[in-house]
Amino acid sequence: MLRNDMTLSLFFTRNISLEIWLKAGLFDREKTIYEQYLKRDYIKEIYWFTYGSHDLEIAQGLYQLNRLNKKIIIVSKPKIFFGKIGNLIYSFLMPVLHAKFIKRTSFIKTNQFDGSWSAIIAAKLFKKRLIMRAGYILSQLNDKAINHNKIKSIIYKIIERSACKNADHIIVSSEHNKKYLIDLYHIQPNRITTVYNYIDISLFNSKNSDRYKDRLLFVGRLSPEKNLLNLVKALEGMTLTLDIYGEGSLKDSLYQLGSQLHVDINFMGSIPNAKMPDVYNKYKFFILPSIHEGMPKVLLESMACGCICIGTNVGGISELIQNEKTGYLIQGTSETDIRKTLEKIMKSDIKLDEMAILSTMKNHSVETIIEKEYKILKSIV
């Protein structure tokens, strides 16, 4: 058992702020585990080191609305640092500028590898325990990207190697990410733990409502790795509508391709995560045709809400979907592969294993995840 006067510092991903979390609809989901730490008296106080110059004022409003626990203290960026260059400079100076908070902290934790050097500097300067958490692996994503950048790959691997070397413990969100880091950086297996992404199963659950049977739901970024252009091509001539929740660089391209191929696509924009259960419960089918994934939260959320989930057989997705048991795996990422699976599903009498789905959800509940993280904290005291 940890002393109940322990404190935790969370270093946000570089360039990410509380304001961005709110605008992207991620705030309610991201804060959950930290408020649970406080609720259970595992941690006395939490400091969030963000890249927003106005985050402190934003937090005051959230406190007044009871949307954020007052024991989560926002350490915001000084206004003198602006733009991406300013953020980069700030990332190196952050530990010195906010030394009074770091001195009071018991543990330092990162949100991703990007910006992790701030946490490393803080831990070294003030002799604090460091947990390196990564929901995705920068070099792995870059190496799998269509437009692979060799210079970025070198930089990412330098960042990751330093992070893994200096961490007291490393947390990743999937088994394939764990294997990747162990193999590439020769990490001792007892220094790295898979802690899956969590969902609030009291919020994300099936309401057994009437659902669209002739529509596919996609939720996420409209970016190349999500493979949405091939999905649209696969839908040509099929009587399925594609409803997309999310924003991204491919929106115009998807709109043009949909018009050209006469595929019915509805762009629904982004909405707060707390409102997504109602969305998921409107659909029978959810699809995630990605070229690669970490541990997709949207797949967990849709499965918990009773959707029949369809995803490509790639890392992350294949850790969640057992083919024809908890969902359907597409054996490839091409438009032909996607169409073949969709046609099979539309013709079949679908009977998934509800007990297997419930077991998957239990493994990803907030309660399960926080106990795993707390065990790690206790192990490095």
Image: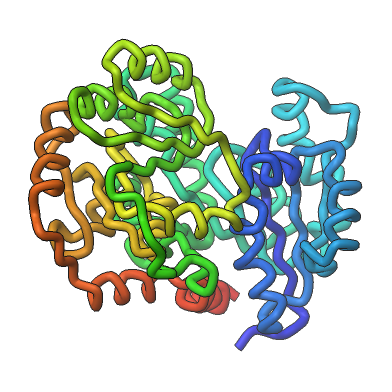
Residue 148 pos. (x, y %) = 34, 19
In the figure, is residue 86 to the left or right of 368?
A: right
Task: Give me the residue at 77% from left, 24% from top.
Answer: 86
What colouring method underlies this structural image?
rainbow
Task: Give me the residue at 84% from left, 53% from top.
Answer: 59
Task: Give me the residue at 29% from left, 18% from top.
Answer: 262
Vertical placement of residue 188 versus 270, above or below: below
Vertical placement of residue 198 versus 2, above or below: above
Indicate the quadrant where residue 187 lies.
bottom left
Q: State the quadrant of the C terminus.
A: bottom right
Indicate the quadrant where residue 191 lies.
bottom left
Vertical placement of residue 19 versus 365, above or below: above
* Residue 246 visible in the shown view: yes
Instruction: Give 152 or 316, whichever is nearer the viewer.
Output: 316
In the figure, is residue 63 to the left or right of 289?
A: right
Task: Give me the residue at 47% from left, 58% from top.
Answer: 170
Residue 95 pos. (x, y %) = 78, 46
Label count reads: 0
Residue 133 pos. (x, y %) = 52, 54
In the figure, is residue 87 to the left or right of 213?
A: right
Q: State the quadrant of the N terminus.
A: bottom right
* Residue 143 visible in the shown view: no
Residue 216 pos. (x, y %) = 32, 42
In the figure, is residue 98 to the left or right of 232?
A: right
